[in-house]
Image (cartoon, grey):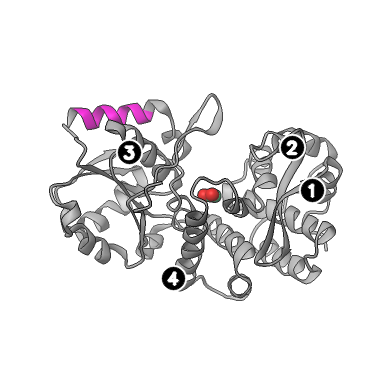
Amino acid sequence: MNYKSRMVYGGLKALNRELAKEEWQGAKYVILVDENTFQHCLPLLVGGVEALHEAEFVEVPVGEECKSLEVAAQVWQTLLESGADRNTVIVNLGGGCVCDLGGYVAAGYKRGIRHIHVPTTLLAMVDAAIGGKTAVNFGGVKNAVGHFYQPRLTIMDTAFLDSLPPEEFFNGQVEMVKTAAVADMALFEQLLTGKKISKQQIVEVARIKNRVVKADPYDRSVRHILNFGHTFGHAVEVCSQLPHGHAVGVGMLAAMYLSMKKLALSEEVYRAYSMWFKSRADVPHYSLREIEQMLPLMHQDKKNTAGELRCVLLQDVGAAAVDVTVSDHEVRDAFLHLGVV
Ligand code: GLY
């Protein structure tokens, strides 16, 4: 893998300095935005970065709607019509969906052009904009088509978070707690007990994710730890139509419960997380019928083999165990005990 990808923690000022460097000379920039980032973030980006003063921009639909082959084709068409060549750089200004689409477009155009992620949501800052996963949805399946294609730069500027709705912020907060849960006990405790998320903590989580991705860029081994709570969470997302972060938060409750029952996770950790989550979000109550509907969704998960459900669980905070076999009976038990201590 071409690992020229770099995190830039100094915000737009640092991007300004980066783009003045030799390797960007002669580049033509196309900024991908959605309706929200066009309104709230584009002026900040263009105003703050000299190389982008003359950039063109392309607006795509908000949210998952932009992650389609049709939208990708429209962007490619616009690039062709505007004479974009291999020295064109796509700048993805948005949340996870814009980053996923922008990376996909960049990977395909003229066999791959450079792209830069400028994440504007907390979730994208700590997850989607790091690690080179690009995708569009296809055939009714989320992220069915995509590549591993690293952004040349990922720029962290928390000023974009000022315009983020609180429920969107919470989605990112849950992913931060997830990353800390699998990698860093001290950070996990800070996140659960602190009043406000700090810029330093956001950077810390981004660094952890970057470190994990560098160790396993193609998601074949250690990167799996980042899926903690996601096998349950994806089923919750579909069944309860909850936002990703909220659903993963519920999924982590189930995974922590099983970690306590099957591995050595202490009740104290489970209790602390459960109280943190329940004081911020609703925990769904599932009937056995609903759980039976969620089980096949969990079995579809690409990590499973030979009909066995495999999950990431915790031996302890910072000590994740991947590929732990979980029976349907244990899944039912976990869903019936969500948040119960
Ligand atoms: N979101 C998990 C990963 O990037 O591997």
Calculate the distance from the C-alpha at mark 3 to the C-alpha at mark 4.
29 Å
Q: What element carries label 3?
A: helix
Q: Main secondary structure of the magenta part?
A: helix
Q: Do the residues labelled 3 and 1 touch (CB within 8 Å)?
A: no
Residue pictured at 19% horizontal, 52% vertical: 24
* Residue 269 image offset from top left, x and y in percent: 74, 69
Q: Which of 261 and 305 is in front in this view?
A: 305
Q: Which amino acid, mark 4? A: Lys
The residue indicated by pointer 2 is 294
The residue indicated by pointer 4 is 199
Neighbour class for label 2 at 10 Å: few (<14), some, many (≥20)?
A: many
Q: Residue 335: which disc?
A: 1
Calculate the distance from the C-alpha at mark 2 to the C-alpha at mark 3.
35 Å
Q: Is mark 2 on a helix, strand or loop?
A: helix
Calculate the distance from the C-alpha at mark 3 to the C-alpha at mark 1.
40 Å
Q: Residue 23: which disc?
A: none
Calculate the distance from the C-alpha at mark 2 to the C-alpha at mark 1.
10 Å
